[in-house]
Image (spheres, grey):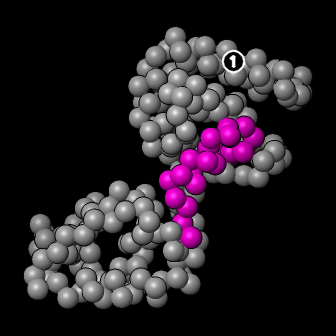
């Protein structure tokens, strides 16, 4: 047998305990206030609700409130259950609406003053130009999705469950795998079972480049 095309859906990763799109969306849907923080290198990650990370300066309350207001704005405007993929498309359009952004920032600053205690007499409000925050929300949102999907979950314990599938693909000379999944479970399985693959982002194992480039 020569060729096979395989379309892999989101259910592929569920047996390895990876979260579904719906489960990730549910994490965002109730807001992210005081639930996210930033590494010194710039990456954002999830923390336990109201964790005290103020000593190393990683918790940025104003960003968590800003992202939350956009999430709530999406739910109010679309009247739909929150979906993180649909939200991202909606936000890309909204972030260039600076009147909307100004209104959101005004709400955020009011909530911070109403709900939080100032640190050293100063509230952690949004003071910089609006565009800076709009750009950073893109970055924050993507980091938070990546943080959820970068965990290994049960892939090591469950990998043998996928072995028959990987071995079946080995019967074919050319295998084209198509997936919109954001996690890297498939890449992990191909590596662990010793299967060469081209991910489309590098020249390694790519049919478009010679063996010299693949080594």
Q: Is residue 109 visible?
A: yes
Q: Give coordinates of residue 160: x percent, y percent.
A: 46, 88
The image quarter containing residue 175 is: bottom left
Between 146 and 54, the residue placed more toward the observer is 146
**Which quarter of the figure is the C terminus placed in?**
bottom left
What is the span of residues highlighted in magenta in the rendered image?
A: 17-41
Q: Left or right: 145 with respect to 56?
A: left
Q: Is residue 213 above or below residue 79?
A: below
Say which residue appears at 50% left-offset and 69% top-offset.
14
Under circle 1, the secondary element is helix
Dot 1 corresponds to which residue? 107
Residue 35 lies in magenta, yes or no?
yes
Residue furthest top in the image: 99
The image quarter containing residue 58 is: top right
Say which residue appears at 33% left-offset and 83% top-offset.
166
Q: Give coordinates of residue 121: x percent, y percent.
A: 89, 22
Q: Give coordinates of residue 40: x percent, y percent.
A: 64, 49
Q: Give coordinates of residue 135: x percent, y percent.
A: 49, 30
**Which quarter of the figure is the N terminus placed in?**
bottom left
Q: Is residue 98 above or below residue 155?
A: above
Say which residue appears at 33% left-offset and 66% top-offset.
8
Residue 107 lies in magenta, yes or no?
no
Q: Left or right: 118 with respect to 167?
A: right
Crowding around mark 1 (Cα neighbors within 10 Å: few <14, some 14 to 19, many 20+) is some
Q: Is residue 29 above or below residue 184?
A: above
Count numbered badges in the picture: 1
Say which residue appears at 38% left-offset and 72% top-offset.
187
Q: Is residue 143 visible?
A: no
Q: Left or right: 170 with respect to 90?
A: left
């Amino acid at each position: 047998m020569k060729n096979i095309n395989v379309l892999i859906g989101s259910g592929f990763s569920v047996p390895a305990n990876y979260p579904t799109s719906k489960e990730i969306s549910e994490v965002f849907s109730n807001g992210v206030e005081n639930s996210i923080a930033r590494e010194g290198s710039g990456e954002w990650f999830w923390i336990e609700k109201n964790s005290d990370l103020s000593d190393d300066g990683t918790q940025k309350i104003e960003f968590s409130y800003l992202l939350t207001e956009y999430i709530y704005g999406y739910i109010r405007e679309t009247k739909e259950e929150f979906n993180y993929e649909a939200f991202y498309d909606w936000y890309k359009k909204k972030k260039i609406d600076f009147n909307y952004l100004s209104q959101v920032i005004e709400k955020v600053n009011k909530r911070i003053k109403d709900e939080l205690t100032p640190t050293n007499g100063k509230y952690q409000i949004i003071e910089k130009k609006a565009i800076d925050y709009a750009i950073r929300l893109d970055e924050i949102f993507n980091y938070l999705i990546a943080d959820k999907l970068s965990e290994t979950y049960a892939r090591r314990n469950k990998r043998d469950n996928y072995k028959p599938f990987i071995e079946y693909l080995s019967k074919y000379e050319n295998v084209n795998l198509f997936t919109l999944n954001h996690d890297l479970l498939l890449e992990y399985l191909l590596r662990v079972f010793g299967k060469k693959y081209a991910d489309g982002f590098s020249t390694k194992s790519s049919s478009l480049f010679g063996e010299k480039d693949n080594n």
